Amino acid sequence: MKKIIIILVCVAYITVNALAQVRIGNLEFIVKKTENDTITQINVNDPCPPCPPETESVQAKPQSKQFTRRTDNDGFCAIGFVMPDIGKGDYYTVLGGNSINIDIGGMRVYHLSRRFALGGTLQYSYYNYKFRDAAGNEEFNQTVLGGKEFVNNDVQKQVYRTHNVAASVFTRFYLAPLETRNGHIVSGRSKLYVDVGVQSDFAGSRYCMLKTLSEKKKRYREDYAFNPFSASVVVRVRSRLLPGNSALFARYRFTEAFNPKALPMDLPPLTVGIQFF
């Protein structure tokens, strides 16, 4: 036991003489003894005083990319049906299923955000109002038809037709926002939106046509009685339930198709239909 203790003491003594290490605060003194010389080493662990204190690196949050505006152009065609008068008595009676509207034109939409856009249309519009008894109305007969007398069952068909050039502007609200990638629109169409706008029509050709047994087909034009200009409110709705690229629309004319000074009654103002892009 004594031999082991003596050996440990000797090893410790040799180690201390070979390597001496002293620390004072941030200073560290290391003394090494070799056979030929003694080496002293001083280490300073504290960083240089003029250096600014090390701060935590803050990673900048990536800025969200702004929405890139985009313009889309589409061609379209539409078919609508004129809603007949419902017992008010201030419109000429028309046949709803046979009174139609056809539109062919182009549309431009300027996307301002994922939920809002502005747009406009330029189109050709055709209206065909099929009357039930306008020829038998005294004011209409005298003003438009020149006071013609018809025998029983002589009138086989009576319609009022216009060929229009129309333009509209509208605002679009996307109820389901547009799909984007890196700020760019992936598709200019959404499955759910509502358009609200106004439309102006100029009827370059407008006439009443009668088909009778005695005179066959004959057109009656009356520039004073038939107004060339009209204005309407248009609402268009796109839904996920509709097939393909189509939308439902409703057009309500808030101006008069006939001059009230010449004819006492007007045409029904509401048209509803479907539009295909």
Image (cartoon, rainbow, N blue to C red):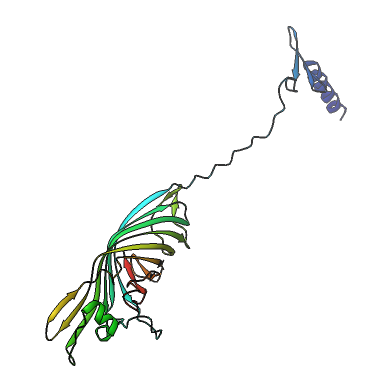
Percent x, y for residue 45?
Answer: 74, 23
Q: Nearer the viewer, residue 254 or 100?
A: 254
Tell me the quarter of the picture where residue 203 sits: bottom left
Q: Does residue 97 appear to the left or right of 63 in the view shown? A: left
Tell me the quarter of the picture where residue 78 sits: bottom left
Quarter that holds the N terminus: top right
Percent x, y for residue 191?
Answer: 41, 64
Percent x, y for residue 132?
Answer: 27, 85
Q: Nearer the viewer, residue 101 or 227?
A: 227
Q: Nearer the viewer, residue 238 or 57?
A: 238
Is residue 10 something one can see in this rendering? yes
Identity of the residue drawn at 37% across and 63% down? 199
Identity of the residue drawn at 47% across and 54% down? 114
Q: Relative to 61, does residue 159 appear above or below in the rendering? A: below
Q: Relative to 7, does residue 234 appear above or below in the rendering? A: below
Tell me the quarter of the picture where residue 251 sits: bottom left
Percent x, y for residue 245?
Answer: 33, 64
Q: Nearer the viewer, residue 153 or 69?
A: 153
Q: Relative to 39, does residue 109 appear above or below in the rendering? A: below
Quarter that holds the C terminus: bottom left
Q: Relative to 237, does residue 136 appear above or below in the rendering? A: below
Identity of the residue drawn at 37% across and 50% down? 71
Q: Does residue 148 appear to the left or right of 176 in the view shown? A: left
Is residue 132 something one can see in this rendering? no
Q: Does residue 222 appear to the left or right of 85 in the view shown? A: left
Query: Extreme right residue here?
Result: 2
Query: Extreme bottom residue here?
Result: 152
